[in-house]
Image (cartoon, helix red, strand yellow):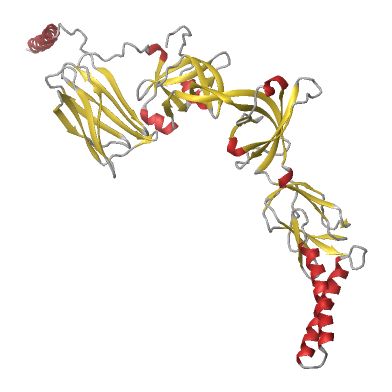
Amino acid sequence: MTLGRTILSISLILSFIIIVFTACSEEQSTHSDHPDHSVHNQRLTYWEDDFEIFALFGVDENSERIDGELFFSRNHQPLDIRDGEVRFMENGSISRQKDLNSTRDGVYPFELTFGNSDEPEFAVTFRTERNTYDIILGSVNRYDGVDADLNEDEVVVLEKPMQWRMSVTSDKAVYHTIPDMVHGTGTVIYNPGHYHEIYSPVDGYIDSGNINVIPASGTAIKSGERLLTISPLLSSENSWTELRLAYRQASQAFERARHLFENDAISLREYQEREREYEVRKAGYDQFLNRNRNGANLDDGGNYLYLNATHNGVIAESFVATGREVKQGDHLFSIYDPAHLWLEVFAYRDELGSLPEITGAEIRTSRNERITLDRSHLALVIRDLRSDATGTRSKVTLSIENHTDALSLNQPVRVRLAGNDSEEVLAVPNEAVFDNESYKVVFVMHSGDQFERRMVQTGSSYGGMTAILDGLESGERIVTKGVYSLHLMTGNVQIDDDHDH
């Protein structure tokens, strides 16, 4: 009995296998016109200004539907829409439509079935807080899922949510103006119009006064800020106390005279004598306190004399210390304004001679920082075409604005001077080019998640843009931020430098 049941069970299993095999054979025969029935992925990407809409979906011939996700981005970060619909369009009419619902920030899954057309248009309508958008992303092919023009061996896929987390950005390669350039080396120096040397106005001693720390070299100061407190000597050829005492005595004598005159105790002539004496002493004392001292003024602190800054700046040199005796005319501080500097540039004399006008400059520091200045932020001070000791180089001096504080005094830099002549060239941001030592690479974005590592030939660069001489076409979208991360991901991708892009 047991043996019979076992034989019956085996027979049923074999019968089920045969039925399944037969059904699969019939299904294969039914679709003999289209031998590949696997689900294949298709991609559609729409870029416009700061918007990106990327559709990644699988096309299943057997179920005649597509199933995937829409990724909405604004400024390269996920965009949450208020609501929306996705649909197939055939001959301008809606054939299938589904509502969109978010599962994650910026991610909206969808599913659509094919109608009569094997290549309908894929469209999306969505609404934000302010606007409604109606966009056709492209056509969906029921059977073809591979871009024949794209060599997948040279492409890396980076999922859109990962791009958002990595802050990957992209933009089109377009034409920019790159001027003629002259290369040179330079040194940042102070601008004499924004440089002040401050000297002691009196004999005395440096006192800590009401401040705990005397400003040292490198300290930033603001106009009106106290620099120093001086305790003057009681008796000295250049003592402040004698001048102050004479003024105070004249002031007190004048106040007494005014009181007496109001009570008819002195004559008008005596009152006027005291008044003139007071005005003379006051004028002398005010002149001592307020006269132009090249970056500083004085405040009467009673027993102390306060020295205050009259300009914003940075202390370049400090020669002071608490308790030190100073004489009138001793050098106390050198102060410069880091926002207004001069730049001395040495370049080959014949190249400078071919640059009749300097319209801009690109400065590169030892840390490889780039500062680009146009004609509104620089001015020619001196053009000295006499040769230096080498007999080949000449000097130009530029007045420059340094509002970003990227440059410091006595800093050596590399400089490229821009002239009037220029040409329109295909260019990309400097950050888009990865220097792989023996060659330069950019990453071309073919869809919302596909990146091609492309070797290019670069030319001159200026204003944050690098000219591309070969390897890239105008309008191709390239990665502008996140290049190094993509380089690490594509380290094993082989680049064929003979490709015709």
- For the C terminus, the quadrant is top left
Q: Residue at x 32, y 35 (%)?
A: 106
Between residue 23 and residue 97, name the one nearer to us.
97
| Relative image position of residue 442 (x, y in whole percent) | 48, 20
- For the N terminus, the quadrant is top left
Q: Where 117 sits versus 310, above or below?
A: above
Residue 169: quadrant of the picture: top left
Residue at the bottom extreme of this rendering: 264
Looking at the image, residue 462 sits to the left or right of residue 391; the answer is: left
Query: Can you see residue 369?
Result: no
Q: Where 286 sits versus 488, above or below?
A: below
| Relative image position of residue 415 (x, y in whole percent) | 65, 28
Residue 381: quadrant of the picture: top right
Looking at the image, residue 98 sits to the left or right of residue 51; the answer is: left
Q: Residue at x 37, y 31 (%)?
A: 161
Looking at the image, residue 101 sits to the left or right of residue 267; the answer is: left
Between residue 77 and residue 161, name the one nearer to us.
77
Residue 286: quadrant of the picture: bottom right
Query: Can you see residue 236?
Result: yes
Q: Where 17 sits versus 349, above or below?
A: above
| Relative image position of residue 194 (x, y in whole percent) | 71, 46
